[in-house]
Image (tube, helix red, strand yellow):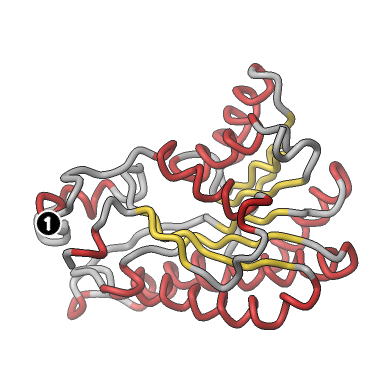
Amino acid sequence: MQFDNQVVAVTGAAQGIGRAVAEAFAAEGAKVAVVDIRKDLALEVVAGIADSGGQAMAVECNVASRAEVNAAAREIASAYGPIEVLVSNAGITRPAMLRNMADDQWRDVLAVHLDASFYWLQAVVEDMVEMGHGRIIFSSSSTAQNGSIGQVNYAAAKAGILGLMRSAARELGRYGILVNAVAPSAATEMTEKVRTDPRFAGGISKSPLRRWAEPDEIAPAYLFLAGSASSFMTGQVLSVDGGNMLVR
């Protein structure tokens, strides 16, 4: 299998895209750390992976806390060995129109997306440098490049992740560490309010495919960026958005 016994950590893996990514890696033989603030849901994902013959562990972590991120990375390394593939995917939305957005809505979204991506990057990079290889994949969004009504916080966080990704790719390539991002567009629990509220929702009817993706349609992009087929790719954004970038 493609990722036989590789150690893969996926944050925000208890539901949505993160869950689909964790399950896809496990199906390809990886030892998967299902990292989420909701350990009860993470345990359900682990049970499903085990039932399918895969290997997984549940790791409770508030990714907005550097201390919890560092503890989670140590827990994974103790159980499975150093993390070889990091998928920094955890996210939240706190939609509000610009003039009505409160400070906590701004700070919470940047903390869970941008701060957490930085914390996890630092938590895994020393082991990857020592191993001489590693893959780091961030979850961004087409919103990072096009903006989104009612989501200045989310767009800013996702754009910040792209800056973080590109800078890390420049620094870490010499150590055999590839750093990329996926910009997905999917129907998940997290995006439901934005997708359904007419104040915020984009015109999906204008999209070439006229629909949102399901999480399992997004997951293969992460496996591609973690696998041998992308061995000469770093600092790139892989858009899996049904062509939404064409029409916004």
Q: Quadrant of the C terminus?
A: bottom left
Identify the residue at image location x=45%, y=72%: 110
Binning the other alpha carbons within 10 Å of mark 1 as few (below 14), some (14 to 19) or many (20 upward) gives some
Residue 56 showing in the rendered view: no
State which quadrant residue 179 falls in: bottom right
Residue extending furthest top? 51
Give above or below for 194 relative to 13: below
The N terminus - image quarter = top right
- The picture places residue 247, in percent across and down from the top left corner, at 17, 64
Residue 147 in percent (x, y) is at 26, 73
- In this orientation, which residue lies closer to the viewer: 69 or 122? 122
Q: State which quadrant residue 27 falls in.
A: top right
- Tell me the residue at 53%/55% (across/down): 89
Q: Which residue is mark 1?
A: 203
In the visual, does 70 lie left or right of 238? right
Quadrant assignment, res 164: bottom right
Is residue 129 found left or right of 100 in the rendered image?
A: right
